Image (tube, helix red, strand yellow):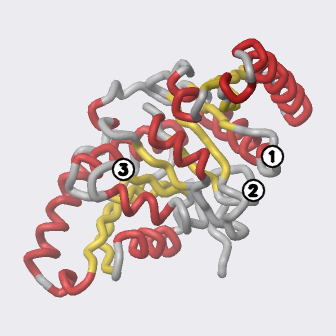
Amino acid sequence: MKILVGYTHTAGGADALRLGTRLAQAFDAPLEIAMVVTGDAGGLRHVRDTAAGWLAEALAAVPEGVAASTHLEFAESAAAGLLGASRNLGTTLIVVGGRERSGSVSNALLHASRVPVAVAPAGHADADPAPLRRVTAAVGLRPGAEAVMRAGVLSAQRAGADLRVLSLVTLDARALGSEAEGEALAAAHGDRVRAFVREVSPEGVAPEVAVAAGRRIEDAVRRVDWENGEIVLVGSSRLASLGRTFLGSTAGKMLRALPVPLVIVPRDMEPTFEDKEPTS
């Protein structure tokens, strides 16, 4: 496994760097820190020198014990530069910040990457630097849920973290007719999710199962108990091309509400972060 951090000299870049270093520590993986210079600016010496200085500062902030190196990339867009860097360096996970200028970059990567993409929430650089304690696999009952769950199992095992399987339900009591009816439907959904987890879990693995309901996905997310040392894995939309990420509507709503990092897994990818990027 090798992790690529898409770094910018912004608060969002600091969030990405913090998440990247935490994941490198959790998975005992080397870290590649890349900054992309776009357009004609790549030909300006002072721009190149400034970017190199920022990368040196980022490298100095990496904790001892994490093998890290820096790369200055030149491309027409930041997203294209990071995708190219990931391909050339053989990285198996891309980490970006989700706020400020990084927001548009993370959005592009979440709809085009061939490797998982982790998005750091705003303020992650200032959060409690807790080790990775729990991996949450967010699943529904549609095709692709089993792969996300297996990815969660393997990630939790590698990091020595707890595993939780989470399913979110949207229920509008007004449309259903009564709050009791909504609660009954949520309970029935929970039973189906637990049966699914028992069916696909490897021998000896018994993850915690949680179901949260709300009128909107964002409401359901806010009802869940989150830990500082936690990441959430979610699958790509069925609209994704084979082997690529595509942030679906439910995952997009989760991303806006989650206080912890979200990792989106490419469609039909083998469920492990150690896979190499397929050739095109």
Check disc 2 and report its element: helix, strand or loop: loop
Callout 1: helix, strand or loop? loop
Q: Residue 19 is drawn in which quadrant?
A: top left
Residue type pointed to by label 2 = Glu
Residue 232 position in % (x across, y down): 57, 37
Q: Nearer the viewer, residue 26 or 111?
A: 111
Mark 1 or mark 3, earlier in chain: 3
Q: Position of residue 57 (x, y in %)?
A: 18, 53
Identify the residue under disc 3: 97
Image quarter of the N terminus: bottom right
The residue located at (38%, 63%) in the rendering is 105
The quarter of the rendered structure image containing the C terminus is: bottom right
- Left or right, 58 with respect to 69, comes to left
Instruction: Give the side of residue 201 with respect to residue 172, left or right.
Output: right
Whether residue 195 is visible here, answered yes or no, is: yes
Tag 1 residue: 142
Cα distance between the residues tagged 3 and 2: 25 Å
x then y, percent, for residue 56: 20, 58
The span from disc 1 to disc 2 (Cα, nearest Å) is: 17 Å
**Residue at the image position 67 percent from the left and 49 percent from the top:** 235
Numbered badge on residue 199: none
Q: Nearer the viewer, residue 134 or 180?
A: 180
- Amino acid type indicated by mark 1: Arg
For numbered disc 3, what is the local secondary structure?
strand
User: What percent of the width, then of the height, locates residue 2?
Assistant: 52, 56
Is 231 located above or below residue 266 in the figure?
A: above
The residue beneath circle 2 is 270
Residue at (77% x, 44% y) in the render: 145
